[in-house]
Image: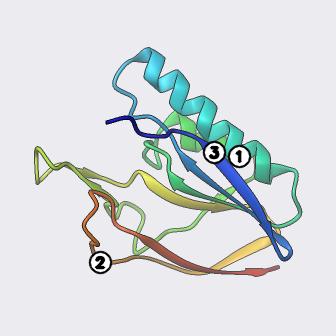
Amino acid sequence: TLRPYAAQYADIGIYRIAAVHGRPPWNNDRTADRDVVNMAGANAVAGHAHGVLVGDFNATPWSPMLLGLRRMGLHRASCSGPVTRTWRSTQFPYYALPIDHVLATPSVRITSCRVGAGIGSDHFPLIFDISPR
């Protein structure tokens, strides 16, 4: 099955919302592809007054990728805790990681964020509210 890996954005009111789905970093080439997708999403929101970046980053909060996005000035919402799992392996049910995230530019306040109940995917939904600062 071919899966799309991309970054897309839309301007909705005062907000620019970018969504990413990076490739799983199984090897160096795939890791580089993942980083390109995640950076495309970050660049789409970084120059916007009210930017929000959300999606399956295929990167943990402590990964160099996420740390780099935070150095760009994006702040990460703690959805139900700092290491709450958002993805679970279908092959290894006890293997799970926090790889889905919500990040925002400094002018956006993430007023709430939580991990929702499973809906049939190997990822749990992120449910969040935002407001301008």
Q: Looking at the picture, which amino acid does disc 2 mark?
A: Ala
Q: CA distance from mark 1 to mark 2?
A: 27 Å
Position in image of residue 70 (x %, y %): 66, 48
Give the residue drawn at x 44%, y 23%.
30
Position in image of residue 101 (x %, y %): 51, 58
Give the residue drawn at x 26%, y 57%.
122
Q: Looking at the picture, which amino acid does disc 1 mark?
A: Ala
Upstream in the sequence, badge 3 or badge 1? 3
- Quarter holding the N terminus? top left
Q: CA distance from mark 3 to mark 1?
A: 9 Å
**Which residue in the protein does label 3 denote?**
7
Other-residue count near label 3 (Cα within 10 Å), few / some / many at <14 / 14–19 / ≥20: many
- Quarter holding the C terminus? bottom right
In the shown orientation, is residue 125 left or right of residue 10?
Answer: left
Position in image of residue 34 (x %, y %): 52, 32
In this orientation, which residue lies closer to the viewer: 35 or 76? 35
**Which residue in the protein does label 1 denote?**
42
Q: Quadrant of residue 112?
A: bottom right
For the residues labelled 3 and 1, say whether their Cβ atoms are less than 8 Å apart.
no
Upstream in the sequence, badge 3 or badge 2? 3
Q: Looking at the picture, which amino acid does disc 3 mark?
A: Ala
Secondary element at image label 2:
loop
**Which residue in the protein does label 2 denote?**
117
Image vertical order of residue 80 relative to residue 30, above or below: below
Give the residue drawn at x 81%, y 79%.
132
